[in-house]
Amino acid sequence: MAQGLEAPVTTLLLAVTGLVTYLAFKRHELMQALLFRPRAILVGHQYHRMLTSAFIHGDWVHFVFNAFTLYSFGSHLEQLYGVTELLVIYFASVIGGSLLSLWIHRRDADYAALGASGGVCGVLYASIFLIPGGGIYIMPIPVAIPSWLFAILFLLFSSYGMSSKNTKIGHDAHFGGAIVGVLAAAVQYPQIIQHDPLLFGGVMALSTGVFLWALRRSGG
């Protein structure tokens, strides 16, 4: 893992997110003002919630998990590709995850969500294509899962999670963020498509199928 001084923007992003999360824990009204709420966005036109919800978390375990994942992958993207590329991928993924979640839950007046998982998934997924050939460790599995296999399994898991109502995990935001992360990476570096066209095509085909299924399921 890179040292903080070698990935200053990733470190700063995590520091700001941690500070806002801490302040939101102390001030209930701040937490409520930053939450992702479809009704407040669509009816109240509070569009900032699609972004600000990424700067707050449900608890410190939630924050630490996201922070560790973002730093593990974001620091490498920052060093290898640059600050602009990292920020474009991260914030595009946050918005992408929010947009998909907004569409799916547009009729749910009580729905609320928070966390940086959409952006984190986008950075992680972009890393799979921008830094190919690696593996991803998931506790308690003792060996690394090949990046290409993780990409497929993650999409399948997210699509299953989106079909289940008995979960507090925002699988739709994870899914939307991951796909937008790949697209943001491909726009900046089209050569990643040529590097592994089979994986890229498979991910896009599977994503399109899941998106159409979610669209139909949500009555769109």
Image: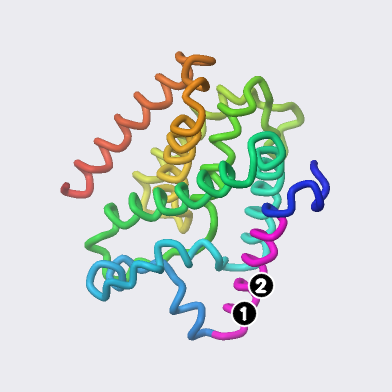
Question: For the magenta stretch, what is the residue range?
Answer: 11-27
| Frontmost residue, 58 versus 31 | 31
Kind of element beneath mark 2: helix
Which part of the image, by quadrant, shows the N terminus? top right
Residue 184 x, y percent position in the rendering = 46, 38
Helix, strand or loop: magenta stretch: helix
- The residue at 40%/44% (across/down) is 176
Circle 1 crowding by C-alpha within 10 Å: few under 14, some 14–19, many from 20: some
Residue 210 x, y percent position in the rendering = 32, 34
- The residue at 71%/27% (across/down) is 144
Q: Which residue is mark 2?
A: 19
Disc 1 and disc 2: Cα gap in Å?
6 Å
Q: Is residue 104 above or below residue 136?
A: below
Q: Is residue 167 above or below residue 114?
A: above
Residue 36 x, y percent position in the rendering = 40, 66
Q: Are marks 1 and 2 in contact (CB under 8 Å)?
A: yes
Residue 58 occupies which quadrant of the picture? bottom right
The amino acid pointed to by label 1 is Leu
Circle 2 crowding by C-alpha within 10 Å: few under 14, some 14–19, many from 20: some
- The residue at 43%/34% (across/down) is 183
Residue 191 marker: none
Q: Which residue is mark 1?
A: 23
* Display coloring: rainbow
Kind of element beneath mark 1: helix
The amino acid pointed to by label 2 is Leu
- The residue at 56%/49% (across/down) is 87
Query: Is 173 positioned to the left or the right of 120 in the image?
Result: left
| Frontmost residue, 208 versus 19 | 19
Q: How many marks?
A: 2
